[in-house]
Image (tube, rainbow, N blue to C red):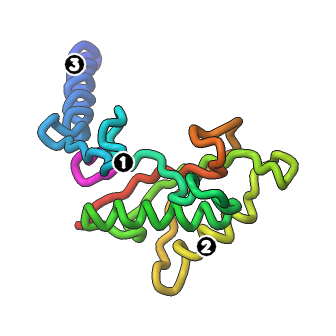
Amino acid sequence: MQPNLAGLKLAFAFVTTAVLFSATPSRGQTTRIPLPPPHADFPISQGVWVGDTLYLSGMMASTLSSPTPGDTKEQTISTIKQIQQALEGQKLTLGDVVMMHAYLAGDPTKGSKMDFAGFMAGYTQFFGTRDQPNKPARSAMQVAALAAPAGLIEIEVIAVRPK
């Protein structure tokens, strides 16, 4: 007996479509979080909720406008504290972060190479600790430049609301 290929193809297409639509959140599940003042007019959101997943825009150190913006370690600490504050505003913690992308600019004091050791010295104060053992999946890469000339690091994260 020959299998009904047309019927199998139709069933496969139906199952594939059903899986895709069940995995795609509806428009009603998307919530945008505006940037806080004084940046509220900037044309991006601080974050976007899609279902139980929060996507935070890249953040940089709060020290960038000071005369001494700090090295990579100091900027990493400042940036993660800002991320922590944004997460707390959404009733999340750093332990809820599942993915991190860290963009490091070349440090002029390090021969224009990214200061990965400085980044790790700041990062490990917040992730994989006794108080906060969760570690996200992560990428860290050197970029040509960041939007703020004194910036050495920009970090974006994805966090998931615990069930």
Give the residue number, with chain letter if any, for mark 2.
Answer: 124
Principal secondary structure, stretch drawn in magenta: strand
Label 3 – label 2 distance at C-alpha: 51 Å
Number of numbered labels in the structure image: 3
Q: Residue at x 36, y 48 (%)?
A: 55
Disc on the earlier residue, 2 or 1: 1
Query: Is 52 a magenta residue?
Result: yes
Q: Position of residue 36 (x, y in %)?
A: 31, 51
| Residue 137 higher or lower than 23, as above or below | below
Q: Amino acid at mark 1?
A: Tyr
Can residue 114 be seen by looking at this rendering?
yes
The outermost residue toward the bottom is 130
SS assignment at label 3: helix
Q: Amino acid at mark 2?
A: Thr
- In the rendered structure, the answer to whether residue 113 lies left or right of residue 79 reads right
| Residue 158 higher or lower than 133, as above or below | above
Q: Position of residue 105 (x, y in %)?
A: 69, 45
Give the residue number, with chain letter if any, for mark 1.
Answer: 55
Q: Position of residue 112 (x, y in %)?
A: 82, 45
Placement of the C terminus among the 4 image quadrants = bottom left
Name the residue nearer the viewer: 130 or 65.
Answer: 65
SS assignment at label 2: loop
Res. 10 mark: 3
Label 1 – label 3 distance at C-alpha: 36 Å
- Classed neighbour count for the residue bearing mark 1: other residues with Cα under 10 Å, few (<14), some (14–19), many (≥20): many
Placement of the N terminus among the 4 image quadrants = top left
Name the residue nearer the viewer: 113 or 36.
Answer: 36
